[in-house]
Amino acid sequence: MASVPLLAFAQKLGLCELASCESSSQRGPGVIKCLTMSVITNLSIPENEGDLNATDLQRTLASHRPIKIAIISVLGVMITLGNIAVVMVITSAVSGWSRNSRYFLLSLTGADSAFGLLIMPLNLCVSFMKEYHEGPDPFCHIVAFFNATIYSTCMYTLATISLERYLAVFYPLKYSTLLTRRRALLLISFSWVFPPVLLFPISFPAGIIEVHFSRASLVCNPLYSSNVTYSLTLTCFIFFPCSAIMTFCNLRLWVAAKRQRLKLRRYSWGGGYRPKVALRVLVPVMTVYYTCWTPCMVIMLYNAISGSGVPEWIEFIAVWLPTSNGFLNCIFYFWINHSFRKKFHLVLQKLFLGLCPGSDSDSGCVSSIDSVAVPGFNSNQRFSSVSSTCTLLTLMPPLTNK
């Protein structure tokens, strides 16, 4: 009779059913056997549920994979075509752009082109290899190293362009002294050499930080939580300094353009078209920069500090947003500029319309782009910067406090 309380206790716990246990010929051993099997069965349920959830997750990731590959491929084609058009134009002189400006823009174009020509093919290659091979591998470490290097080089290049623009606008008479050709090339070299040196440990499989392939973003990513100190060091040397330089320079330019617009209104100098262009360029440039890069950095810091991941599509969007910046740069740093568009039309005429058989004679086919004449400005000084912002402010008389 001692088995009856044991049976009742087991039933209250939900470990076995009365019918199955009462059917036993020997109530004591039957209850014990029923209880034992029920405990084993119930203890194995969480494991089975976990396996089921993992299987469902893998199926979900597999079903979303073609969509992600299509998005990455389309983005890669857009970036490549956009930067090819940019290279076709800025390899030769563009009216209103200084030689240093072209150097910095070629550097930015090279970094943006690497997104479409190097980063995307390498990560897609790893995603196909993971169909047959699991676990960490040296190739994934190399791909993660290239990913981080190109991302960092792009941020440093954007920062140097903002610095060059700042010097061109606020120090037009000292520009050639402050930023000589040698110093401009040194800045560009720093943007391409320093990131690989800082990120070199990522390339070692047995290095100071782990690397894994994310099926959510289809990217080889460092596991930032495996070395929190190194991860925080990367953000302190890359994202925060570049963001600070860009914010300071572009904010100063925006304030100067706004003041210039007010002065033009006060003295009735034609309505201030160029200040309007400047204000329309600066705000989108900074908005796009922070929109594309901040989510990726936030997830990086979150993963490093908490060791946790984020939902699938949030990770995918945050990781690939900086890559889309490579295409948006073509719009905000090039296509908005009137001189660039004129030169691009000239190049198209040479290539497709056959109007200019000689590649060196630009003036015989399309009228040249004349500089805007403004009283008090020497037209021989061509220290204008990249965008309409710099063209605007260097063409106007210096700002004076009255």
Image (cartoon, rainbow, N blue to C red):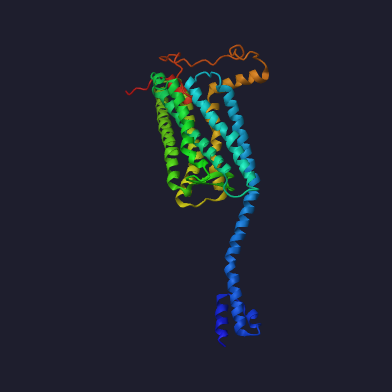
Q: Residue at x 51, y 23 (%)?
A: 102
| Image quadrant where residue 78 sits | top right
Give the camera-side residue of 248 and 370.
248
Residue 402 placed where, x, y %?
32, 23
Give the camera-side residue of 398 and 44.
44
Give the camera-side residue of 1 and 87.
1
| Image quadrant where residue 142 sits | top right
The number of discs equals 0
Left or right placement of residue 74 versus residue 370 in this view: right
| Image quadrant where residue 12 sits | bottom right
> Can residue 83 be seen from the camera position used here?
yes
Residue 47 placed where, x, y %?
58, 63
Q: Residue at x 56, y 14 (%)?
A: 368
Tell which residue pokes out farthest to the front in this image: 206
Residue 289 placed where, x, y %?
49, 36
**For residue 82, above or below residue 33:** above
Tell which residue pokes out farthest to the bottom in this image: 1
> Can residue 265 be seen from the camera position used here?
no
Quadrant (top left, top right, bottom left, bottom right) of the N terminus: bottom right
**For residue 362, above or below residue 281:** above
**For residue 307, above or below residue 365:** below
Residue 282 placed where, x, y %?
47, 31
